[in-house]
């Protein structure tokens, strides 16, 4: 859908969509809310007319009928006492059901974003954050706001008819006085929504610095380097800027609301004085005077409801627009025009003159890369930092598409294959693997969710990754939570409620997770042993060597000794292939690979076993 400014007048276009979401989520709750709106609109008008009848009856000679009107007035009083509670319940129930439906729909839309480009776009991220914070409640807020408008409109129309019968001029004055209030509220609503979007980036920065001050991941470095005062000052500076913007908005609202409130009070007071004088002169009966006062209050109250409802509904619509932009956004990667199976890999994955950069204003990462990952053979990918190794992984997993060139799977462009089907053919360990706040078994079983309850298979993957014995020693074995965030005050000292693993243990768990997909066509290993000690790393690579034999695999690493036994070693430099071949061929060629391999070995004595040390960054 087209992009529009968040403050545009065409925001009303979101109203049918918001109503449709509310109806699909909770049709019975919507009907209940509509019914209560009609009743709540009729009761004040009925009470005002009944009050007029009662007062006029009391002012007449004895014998004028008053009981029916008095009973009706009492019944109206009961309804007026109960209706707010019923409306509150109906709004809460509608909000709960709509939020559940809309939130599921929102994150379903995020799930359909099969690539990473949009999630890395700051503008889209701000919109997504607003959609997540306000979008799920938006439809119920929109509906509630405009039902409040409808209620106010019904009340106002009823009392307008009453005022016109008593004094047309009073009606004109009351209505005209409400116009500035309406315009003011709409402008303020638009300004509030624009402010919410403008503050997205400062709020992200404030959260970033606050997280640095509390994160266990960075706590050691923050304390060692004394970074707390710096980060705290930057956090408070961002928060002060945010508060200043909110303060300016609050002052603007205060000034505008004070002005229109004074105007409304003046009009109401002037009308009351006129009615008193008219009643004293006999132009109005006592009942007419009572009805006039109730009508003035009713019109102002109804107009206030209309204005407040429009303001709330308009603001909710503006925020709901962000929700729609996310939910109705098209795919971030082109989808295959026809459904087709991704065949087993028989020949290989080929990069053909692939150019790629992460944005039009970003430098090229790959500059015409031509590379083959052959089926049935192990490939090692090495190179200095920034050479493009991780980008190759992202393109292989089709998190992005090439800007130029193509990547093919047995000759078929990846863009012509269903992305979900493609990924079922892959297994991967990423350098920045995820530590899930779940049990040890689930952390491993997530590698293949169809087998997440297959404990024997999970144990085999853990054993292959060398983490089985460590998991078995945990308080509850494979059922132990690998986190402490779910502990309560009563059990925070009990390690059985959760355990935090070391970095090396997490590395093995992540590897075991990938091994749950061990039968896939292409195994991608991006620095699979970066957190392990030398002995554990050697053992892992020996096991991986067995797994990689006879199948397509890509090992990305800084540790050249780890790729020594690969069938093919590819050296990347500046986004292209600098050289490739077997270890022996590359050493004989005496190029970049040979130079770096010898550089790694310089620190080791001849009588010591070769270690696996990192490639210079």
Image (cartoon, rainbow, N blue to C red):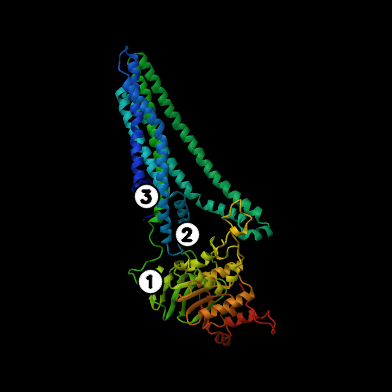
Residue at the image point whose x is 58% and y is 46% from the top:
240
Asked whether disc 3 touches disc 2, contact meaning CB atoms under 8 Å apart, the reply is: no
Q: Nearer the viewer, residue 377 or 212?
A: 377
The picture quadrant where one finds residue 613 is: bottom right
The N terminus sits in image quarter: bottom left
Res. 121 mark? 2
Does residue 60 appear to the left or right of 488 in the view shown? left
Q: Nearer the viewer, residue 318 or 105?
A: 105
Res. 25 mark? 3
Q: Does residue 590 appear anywhere in the picture?
A: yes
Residue 424 rendering spot, x and y as whole percentages: 43, 71
The C terminus sits in image quarter: bottom right
Q: Which residue is mark 1?
A: 417
Residue at the image point whose x is 39% and y is 78% from the top:
411
Secondary structure at badge 2 equals loop
Q: Residue furthest top?
A: 61
Residue at the image point whose x is 33% and y is 68% from the top:
337
Asked whether disc 1 touches disc 3, contact meaning CB atoms under 8 Å apart, the reply is: no
């Amino acid at each position: 859908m087209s992009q529009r400014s968040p403050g545009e007048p065409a925001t009303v276009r979101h109203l049918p969509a918001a109503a449709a979401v509310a109806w699909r989520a909770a049709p019975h709750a919507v009907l209940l809310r509509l019914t209560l709106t009609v009743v709540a609109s009729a009761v004040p008008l009925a009470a005002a007319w009944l009050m007029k009848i009662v007062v006029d009856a009391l002012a007449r000679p004895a014998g004028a009928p008053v009981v029916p009107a008095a009973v009706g007035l009492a019944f109206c009083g009961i309804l007026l006492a109960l209706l707010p509670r019923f409306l509150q319940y109906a709004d809460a129930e509608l909000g709960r059901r709509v939020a559940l439906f809309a939130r599921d729909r929102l994150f379903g839309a995020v799930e359909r974003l099969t690539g990473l480009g949009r999630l890395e776009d700051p503008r889209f991220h701000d919109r997504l954050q607003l959609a997540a914070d306000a979008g799920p409640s938006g439809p119920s807020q929109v509906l509630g706001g405009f039902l409040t408008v409808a209620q106010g409109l019904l009340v106002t129309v009823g009392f307008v008819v009453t005022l016109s019968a008593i004094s047309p001029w009073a009606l004109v004055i009351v209505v005209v006085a409400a116009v500035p209030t309406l315009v003011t509220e709409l402008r303020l609503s638009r300004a509030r929504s624009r402010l919410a979007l403008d503050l997205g980036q400062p709020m992200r920065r404030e959260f970033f610095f606050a997280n640095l001050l509390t994160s266990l991941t960075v706590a050691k470095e923050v304390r060692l380097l004394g970074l707390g005062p710096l980060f705290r000052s930057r956090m408070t500076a961002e928060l002060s800027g945010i508060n200043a913007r909110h303060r300016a908005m609050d002052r603007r609202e205060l000034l505008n609301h004070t002005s229109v409130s004074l105007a409304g009070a003046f009009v109401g007071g002037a009308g009351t004085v006129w009615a008193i004088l008219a009643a004293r002169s006999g132009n109005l009966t006592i009942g007419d005077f009572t009805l006039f006062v109730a009508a003035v209050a009713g019109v102002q109250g109804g107009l206030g409801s209309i204005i407040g409802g429009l303001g709330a509904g308009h603001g909710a619509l503006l925020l709901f627009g962000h929700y729609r932009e996310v939910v109705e956004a098209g795919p971030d990667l082109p989808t295959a025009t026809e459904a087709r199976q991704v065949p087993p890999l028989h020949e290989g994955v080929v990069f053909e003159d692939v150019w790629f950069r992460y944005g039009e204003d970003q430098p090229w990462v790959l500059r015409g890369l031509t590379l083959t990952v052959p089926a049935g053979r192990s490939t090692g990918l090495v190179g200095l930092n920034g050479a493009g190794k991780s980008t190759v992984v992202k393109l292989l997993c089709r998190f992005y598409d090439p800007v130029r060139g193509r990547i093919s799977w047995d000759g078929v462009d990846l863009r012509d294959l269903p992305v979900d089907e493609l990924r079922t053919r892959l297994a991967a360990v990423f350098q920045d693997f995820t530590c899930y706040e779940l049990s040890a078994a689930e952390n491993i079983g997530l590698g293949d969710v169809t087998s997440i309850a297959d404990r024997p298979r999970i144990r085999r993957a853990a054993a292959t990754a060398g983490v089985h014995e460590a998991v078995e020693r945990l308080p509850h074995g494979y059922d132990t939570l690998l986190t402490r965030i779910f502990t309560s005050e009563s059990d925070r000292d009990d390690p059985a409620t959760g355990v935090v693993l070391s970095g090396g243990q997490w590395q093995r768990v992540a590897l075991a997770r990938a091994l749950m997909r061990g039968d896939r066509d292409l195994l991608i290993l991006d620095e699979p042993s970066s957190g392990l000690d030398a002995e554990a790393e050697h053992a892992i690579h020996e096991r991986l060597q067995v797994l990689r034999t006879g199948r397509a695999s890509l090992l990305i690493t800084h540790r050249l000794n780890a790729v020594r036994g690969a069938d093919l070693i590819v050296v990347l430099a500046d986004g292209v292939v600098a050289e490739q071949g077997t270890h022996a061929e590359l050493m004989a060629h005496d190029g970049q690979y040979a130079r770096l391999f010898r550089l790694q070995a310089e620190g080791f004595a001849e009588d010591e076993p070769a270690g696996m040390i990192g490639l210079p960054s």
